[in-house]
Image (spheres, helix red, strand yellow):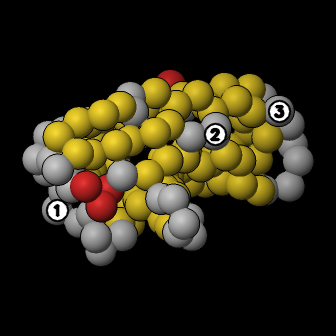
Amino acid sequence: QVQLVESGGGLVQAGESLRLSCAASGNIVRIYAMGWHRQAPGKQRELVATIISGGSTNYADSVKGRFTISRDNAKNTVYLQMNSLKPEDTAVYSCNLQGIVNWNPNRDYWGQGTQVTVSS
């Protein structure tokens, strides 16, 4: 099994910043990608940002220029620096890992999620 432990969520005002962290542990053989998704009340889950093993990144249009995803390969940890937060960024943010664990076939794993609330 793999454990994804997220931290860093909270309540902030519009324009402020937060940094989310997600540490992966377990019998991880290979990580192909890690990333963040979010789900706001009444809405579908959406991709926020991903980073693949080679370091390339991908962002949702709504967060480009404001959010930065990074990764510490030695710690199997992914970060999401969120600047200039807006009320519409309010959501539960979940960490995702795509990879091989316990030599099982490549698949997605998810964290429990951390709440981010941005007040206007």
Q: Report the residue at 23% width, 36% height from top.
A: 12
Which of 30/120 is in front? 120
Q: Decide: few, some or many residues near mark 1? Use Cα within 10 Å; few <14, some 14-19, many ≥20.
A: few
Residue 10 pos. (x, y %): 35, 31
Which of 39/83 is in front? 39
Q: Which residue is mark 2?
A: 111
The answer to whether residue 31 of the structure is visible from this angle is no
Residue 56 pos. (x, y %): 38, 61
Residue 39 pos. (x, y %): 52, 58
Q: Which residue is mark 3?
A: 1
Q: Report the residue at 41% width, 59% height from top.
A: 49
Residue 9 pos. (x, y %): 39, 33
Q: Which residue is mark 1?
A: 65
Q: CA distance from mark 2 to mark 3?
A: 12 Å
113 is higher (above) or lower (below) than 96: above
Q: Which mark is residue 20?
A: none
Which of 9/36 is in front? 9
